[in-house]
Image (cartoon, rainbow, N blue to C red):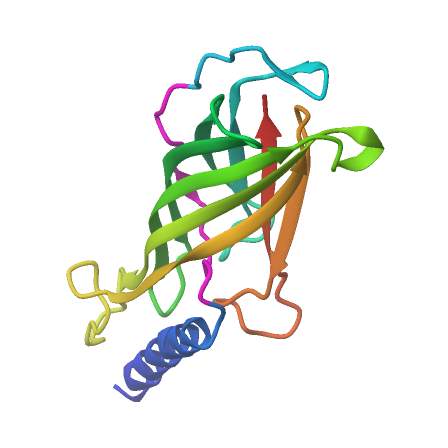
Amino acid sequence: MNDNKRRQKCIVAIICLALLLLACGPSTVGVAPAGRSTPTPTPTPTPVGLILGGNVIPGGGEIELRISDLMKPGSEDCVNHFPFVVNQDTDPLTITGEGVLFCHFESEPGEGGIHHAVMEYTVTVEGAIIPGAGSSGAALLRAVLTFDGSLTQYVSDYPAGAVPLFTVDNPAVIQESGPMPLDFDYVDGATQSITRANPYLQVPGAPDVRWEFILHL
């Protein structure tokens, strides 16, 4: 009985610490998950040739987001895609698009059960293409991705005798909304990376969470 009580206290302490760290974090997007992932099933816009600074540029594309696994470092990244099109009737040229971010991380089974972190956000894409402002004279894409959604945490497979506190039917949920500005050279394969402290594995030596954005034209 004492062992079960200690396990329950550990489960509650881990989840409460994660919620406290998220609530104190920046109001952009806090965390990310990835063990199972569902890429956004949205079609890539058909590129249309546009003239910018005397050069023909793609008229659309997508921003790919890869998020490293919160709970099992070194596992497969969670991958999502946000398509956009270039608006031809603005000066400078602007982009608009949208998509969905979904990631589901799971811990390995242990004495405290299996911990889950599920990320679900709608994502809007806006930005401007500025001629000659990138490196080596390339155009610069000054983009803003706005995330609106939630991070949900719960525990499954509780050990025998434990009292379930955060379950799939009664999870801990953090609502989040905010912008994330990103600058890319407007060329296919341009990347931006953001590193964040791991909000879940707050133990010595826990790896940071990596968000990698890749521009596809």
Asked whether residue 76 is in view, the answer is no
The structure residue drawn at horizontal position 68% and vertical position 25%, both measured from the top left corner, is 187
Q: Position of residue 36 (x, y in %)?
A: 40, 41
Return the residue found at the far right. 136
The structure residue drawn at horizontal position 44% and vertical position 39%, both measured from the top left corner, is 125
Q: Is residue 21 above or below residue 46?
A: below
Q: Position of residue 3 (x, y in %)?
A: 33, 83
* Magenta-colored span: 27-43
Quadrant assignment for the C terminus: top right
The structure residue drawn at horizontal position 55% and vertical position 64%, both measured from the top left corner, is 198
Q: Is residue 152 above or below residue 58?
A: below
Q: Is residue 92 above or below residue 102?
A: above
Asked whether residue 30 is drawn in magenta, I would say yes
Quadrant assignment for the N terminus: bottom left
In the foreground, 88 or 217: 88
Q: Position of residue 95 (x, y in %)?
A: 49, 31
In this picture, residue 30 sits left or right of residue 118: right
In this picture, residue 6 sits left or right of residue 144: left
In the foreground, 114 or 51: 51
Asked whether residue 56 is in view, the answer is yes
Please tell me how many numbered marks the rendered image carries: 0
Task: Examine the image and state in which quarter residue 124 appears.
Answer: top left
Q: Is residue 57 above or below residue 151?
A: above
Return the residue found at the far left. 169
Q: Which is the main secondary structure of the residues drawn in magenta?
A: loop
Q: Position of residue 136 (x, y in %)?
A: 84, 31
Task: Examine the image and state in which quarter residue 213 appears.
Answer: top right
Asked whether residue 147 is drawn in magenta, I would say no
